[in-house]
């Protein structure tokens, strides 16, 4: 798969560790930074990653900040994005099966590289369940975008 990845200053070290791991799984990476610990704003790094996924130019996105929370909030503002904040292996599997998430957010200040790698491996290899109830629920979530699209 083609994976777009981005981080802020509080997540870039974990990102740097995860990029070669993701490549070793056979995936292609497009890295949108940042690349140092100089303070930046997480929405500026969430947006290009989510745009790539939303436009179909990347299959999935991975975002890392200090907590993962800011990245996940920003990501879920982008049409077409279903982002999950995940810090455990159970949720990594469940959010693919139930929510068909296309962006994964994690916090460098919350988990270490070993757990992050396992989360990514599970999240990338788990298919959407395609069960009728999950398809219907995800569809209802996506309809919220059109409901609020005309709001100022
Ligand atoms: C940066 O200090 C921190 O606020 C950011 O990385 C993230 O955790 C926000 O949600």
Image (cartoon, rainbow, N blue to C red):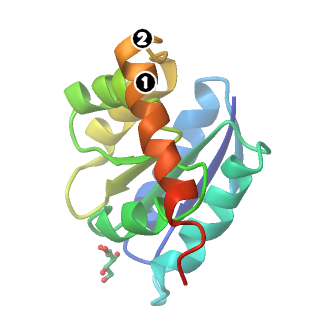
Is 132 left or right of 27, judged from the image as shown?
left
Q: Nearer the viewer, residue 36 or 4?
A: 4
Q: Position of residue 32 (x, y in %)?
A: 67, 64
The yes-or-no answer for disc 1 within 8 Å of ligand 1 is no
- State yes or no: discs 1 and 2 in contact (Cβ < 8 Å): yes
Q: Residue at x 26, y 37 (%)?
A: 115
Report crowding for label 2: few under 14, some 14 to 19, many 20 or more residues within 10 A (C-alpha): few
Secondary element type, mark 1: helix
What number is the disc on residue 41?
none
Q: Is residue 81 above or below residue 94?
A: below
Instruction: Determine which quarter of the picture holds residue 129.
Output: top left
Q: Is residue 34 above or below residue 13?
A: below
Report crowding for label 1: few under 14, some 14 to 19, many 20 or more residues within 10 A (C-alpha): few
Instruction: Determine which quarter of the picture holds residue 119.
Output: top left
Q: Nearer the viewer, residue 10 or 48?
A: 48
Is 87 left or right of 29, judged from the image as shown?
left
Is residue 33 visible to us here? no
Q: Residue at x 19, y 58 (%)?
A: 110
Image quarter of the N terminus? top right
Residue occupying the far bottom of the picture: 39
Q: Is residue 45 above or below residue 26?
A: below
Rounded to the nearest angstrom, the CA distance separating label 1 from label 2 is 6 Å
Q: Position of residue 46 (x, y in %)?
A: 55, 67
Q: Residue at x 47, y 77 (%)?
A: 42
What number is the disc on residue 132?
2
Figure quarter occupied by ligand 1: bottom left
Q: Position of residue 111 (x, y in %)?
A: 22, 51
For mark 1, what is the residue?
136
Secondary element type, mark 2: helix
Q: Nearer the viewer, residue 124 or 114?
A: 124
Q: Residue at x 37, y 74 (%)?
A: 10
Is residue 136 visible to us here? yes
């Amino acid at each position: 798969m083609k994976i777009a990845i981005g981080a802020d200053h509080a997540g870039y070290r974990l990102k740097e560790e995860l990029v070669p791991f993701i490549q070793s799984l056979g995936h292609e990476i497009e890295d949108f930074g940042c690349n140092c610990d100089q303070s930046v704003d997480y929405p500026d790094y969430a947006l290009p990653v989510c745009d790539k996924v939303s436009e179909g130019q990347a299959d999935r996105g991975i975002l890392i900040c200090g907590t993962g929370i800011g990245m996940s909030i920003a990501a879920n503002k982008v049409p077409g994005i279903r982002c999950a904040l995940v810090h455990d292996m159970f949720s990594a599997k469940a959010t693919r099966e139930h929510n068909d998430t296309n962006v994964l957010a994690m916090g460098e200040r919350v988990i270490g590289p070993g757990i992050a790698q396992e989360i990514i491996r599970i999240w990338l290899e788990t298919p959407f369940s395609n069960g009728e109830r999950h398809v219907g629920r995800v569809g209802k979530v996506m309809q919220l975008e059109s409901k609020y699209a005309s709001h100022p």
